[in-house]
Image: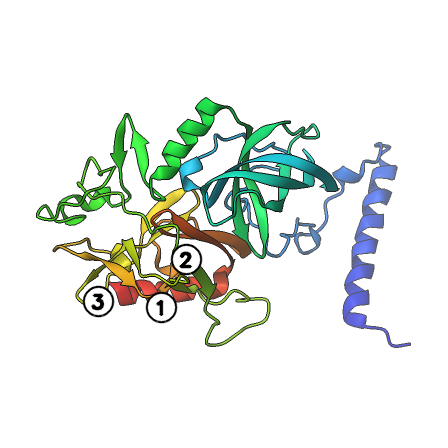
């Protein structure tokens, strides 16, 4: 057996010092308390930091054990909104946190589709998760539900009993494109900060809603259009670091029908498609114009897609200035929007890798 003397000798010295302290205390008749013993500085015990854990929590997480505060559903920001009836409830595993996280799979029979590409009368299943002290209960009869399609499944983001008044209010909210808001009876667009640059005064468009700040019309993509978003593989894949790439996403707008489709929300000048002035990105409850957007400085026209035609571009979400970027390795979600159509993407962000990329992109933009 081999003995490492570099380890044994300091241990023996520490033991001798400890015994000496006990002996001294016994000689003076003092009751011995372990906390009274003073070890040399080199042997003082210090709490060790757990690797990867800082004093703060990840963005979006509160202190341990703190229940999530219920928030009103922002129906206008949801990817899919519909009325339905719950036909089946299947309980899943419960996470034994404080408070616990209850998981259920709900089956819906779709009534009316207020937003999104699902079909009336269809049957779908979606995952419901609730972090609360009591097991959740679900309403009977007609409900209105908000869903997101992410990572291959449907996730419930809002679920409430439905009455005609509520449905009418939600339907009005879903008439507006993603990111638009109704503030004190006035409709405001996400391009409001661009003011006069957001839409040329000389161009008049027949639209139901106009931005009260910029005059920009609320333009929709249209029900026949297919809007898709796909992750672009990274130039160099690094295990445990960039499984979702390095922030690039391919945006595809296509016409699967046998008739031409006018995509009002997608603008062009001549043959040049103005993607940066048409797309929006939602992240952490905020809406951002596409990176590099400067506004529509002259009149534009909508893109017309011929039967079977598609157009595409690549957007890098890491160019966004404003989100609270995770520390360490954690997920962040981006929702890419064109008019009333959108696609939500979950992105694994590793700060030691993606911070460097963001810094490089920021220098390029400046």
- Residue 272, numbered circle: 3
Which residue in the structure is indicated by mark 1? 309
**Residue 95 in sight in this render:** no
Q: Earlier in the sequence, mark 3 or mark 1?
A: 3
Instruction: Tell me the quarter of the picture where residue 217 sits.
Output: top left
What element does badge 1 sit on? loop
State the image quarter where residue 102 is shown: top right
Looking at the picture, how far across and down is residue 295, in whole percent?
A: 19, 53
Query: Mark 2 — residue?
Result: 227
| Residue found 82% across the figure and 66% down from its top | 8
Give the distance between the C-alpha atoms of the residues marked 3 and 1, in whole angstroms: 16 Å
| x then y, percent, for residue 334 | 44, 53
Q: Give left or right: position of 54 versus 134.
A: left
Q: Quadrant of the N terminus?
A: bottom right
Q: Which residue occupies the foreground of this view, 177 or 164?
A: 164
Residue 67 drawn at (x, y percent): 60, 32
């Amino acid at each position: 057996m081999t003995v490492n003397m570099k380890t044994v000798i300091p241990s023996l010295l520490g033991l001798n010092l400890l015994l000496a302290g006990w002996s001294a205390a016994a000689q003076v008749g003092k009751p011995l308390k372990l906390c009274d013993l003073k070890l040399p500085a080199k042997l003082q015990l210090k709490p060790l930091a757990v690797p990867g854990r800082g004093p703060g929590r990840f963005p979006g997480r509160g202190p341990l054990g703190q229940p999530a505060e219920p928030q009103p559903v922002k129906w206008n920001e949801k990817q899919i909104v519909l009325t339905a009836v719950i036909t089946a409830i299947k309980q899943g595993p419960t996470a034994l946190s404080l408070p616990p996280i209850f998981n259920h799979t709900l089956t819906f029979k779709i009534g009316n589709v207020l937003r999104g590409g699902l079909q009336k009368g269809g049957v779908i299943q979606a995952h419901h998760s609730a972090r609360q002290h009591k097991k959740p209960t679900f309403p009977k009869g007609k409900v209105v539900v908000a869903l997101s399609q992410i990572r291959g499944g449907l996730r419930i983001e809002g679920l409430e009993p439905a009455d005609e008044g509520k449905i009418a209010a939600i339907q009005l909210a879903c008439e507006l494109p993603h990111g638009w808001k109704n503030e004190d009876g006035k409709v405001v667009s996400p391009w409001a900060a661009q003011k006069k640059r957001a839409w040329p005064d000389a161009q008049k468009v027949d639209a139901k809603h106009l931005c009260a700040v910029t005059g920009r019309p609320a333009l929709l993509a249209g029900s026949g259009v297919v809007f898709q978003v796909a992750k672009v593989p990274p130039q160099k894949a690094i295990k445990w670091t960039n499984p979702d790439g390095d922030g690039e996403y391919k945006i595809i707008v296509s016409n699967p029908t046998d008739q031409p489709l006018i995509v009002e929300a997608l603008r062009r000048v001549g043959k040049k498609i103005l993607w940066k002035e048409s797309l929006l990105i939602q992240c952490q409850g905020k809406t951002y114009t596409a990176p590099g957007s400067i506004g529509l400085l002259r009149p534009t026209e909508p893109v017309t897609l011929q039967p079977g035609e598609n157009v595409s571009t690549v957007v890098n979400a890491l160019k966004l200035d404003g989100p609270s970027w995770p520390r360490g390795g954690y997920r962040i979600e981006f929702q890419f929007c064109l008019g009333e159509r959108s696609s939500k993407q979950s992105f694994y962000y590793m700060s030691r890798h993606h911070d460097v990329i963001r810094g490089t992109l920021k220098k390029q933009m400046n």
